[in-house]
Image (spheres, helix red, strand yellow):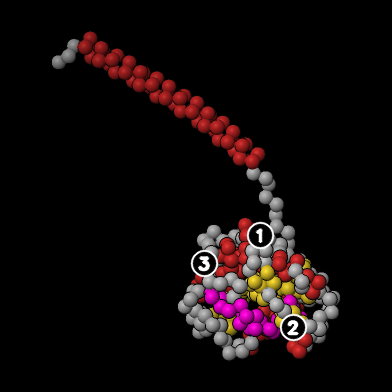
Amino acid sequence: MPSLSDLARQLLDAATADATSDNLLRADLEVARSNEVALRAEIARLQAIIDAEEPPVEPEPPVTPPTEDPNPGPWSGTGTVVTGPVLTAAGKRVLTAYPGNAQGPRPLVLVGHGRGMDPAAALQGHQFLVKAGYVVAVPDLGASSDFNGLAKQVVAATQAVLQGSLKDKVAANRIGYTGGSQGGITGLALVDDANGAKGLFDCLVIKCGAAYTSGQEWASAPPLLFIHGTADSTVKYADGQAAYAKATKPKGMISLAGVGHDLNAGDNIIQEATLGLYDRFLLGKGAGAIDRIAQAAKKNTKATYVSDWTLD
């Protein structure tokens, strides 16, 4: 059995060890606190540099429809005039047509055709717009998956029309776009500010389209009308739905049950819905003009229509 003096010595040694350990822990704590203060100071310094380099983000202005069309027609199909191609600065051709009985400048609509489609056929398919009083321009987009490049071609085509022989026939502050398939995806690429279209287009019709990238921008989007068939096997309907869900308002979407990529819905719903959007945002007709879309959808048993045309 240890003596009393041995026990006392053991207790003293243990107490000394505890004190030493406690002192080491306190020292480690002080070092950690000092490091935290230094780290917070470094974070604050770096944030100040970032704030100084990045200009403040200005909020997007609210969408404002143009004033009432000063030259509303009526328009006659017999007055349609098809002109020769306009050339962009890069030498790309742009086919154009305008109403021959126009009295003054008319709204302009750019058409984005499908992959490899003949631009002349696309122009012919949009004669209903010319008959309704619009100047129509179809750039030759060929077949490509470079949607940034295609969007820039559309912007260049628009500028070529505005600066070319038709400049006196076009209302430069009333410009729309419609595109299907490749042209529909290109239309959503136009929403991206990096492609040079910010503020250029007053509204877009997106047929069988989808976001062109997972990082699709929406902040600068003008009013959008999506039209998609639920049986589309080329551009999935779910992708079109996802794009509509993420898009900023004002917006609307027509879904056509059982309809494929050709959007053959059995009537003129595509034309009527397109004209409804343009009535509101290109011709400047009253808020009720947008109801033309709902009326067209109501007449078609395959159509389901959702929308939020609220102007912030």
- Specify the amino acid type for callout 2: Val
Q: Residue at x 46, y 24 (%)?
A: 30
Asked if the residues shown at circle 2 and circle 1 are in contact, with their CB atoms under 8 angstroms apart, the answer is no
Mark 2 crowd level (few <14, some 14–19, many ≥20, 10 Å Cα):
some
Q: Could you say which disc has been placed on residue 196 in the image?
A: 1
Residue 300 in the magenta stretch? The answer is no
Q: Residue at x 58, y 63 (%)?
A: 149
**Residue bounds of the magenta highlight:** 114-135
Check the image and report above or below for 251 versus 28: below
Dot 3 amino acid type? Ser
Circle nearer the viewer, 2 or 3: 2
How many neighbours does mark 1 have within 10 angstroms: few (below 14), some (14-19), or many (20 or more)?
some
**Which residue is disc 2 drawn over?**
81
Judged left or right of residue 189, residue 22 is left
Describe the element under mark 2 as helix, strand or loop.
strand
Q: Secondary structure at mark 1?
A: loop
- Which residue is tagged 3? 145
Q: Quadrant of the N terminus?
A: top left
Quadrant into which the C terminus falls:
bottom right
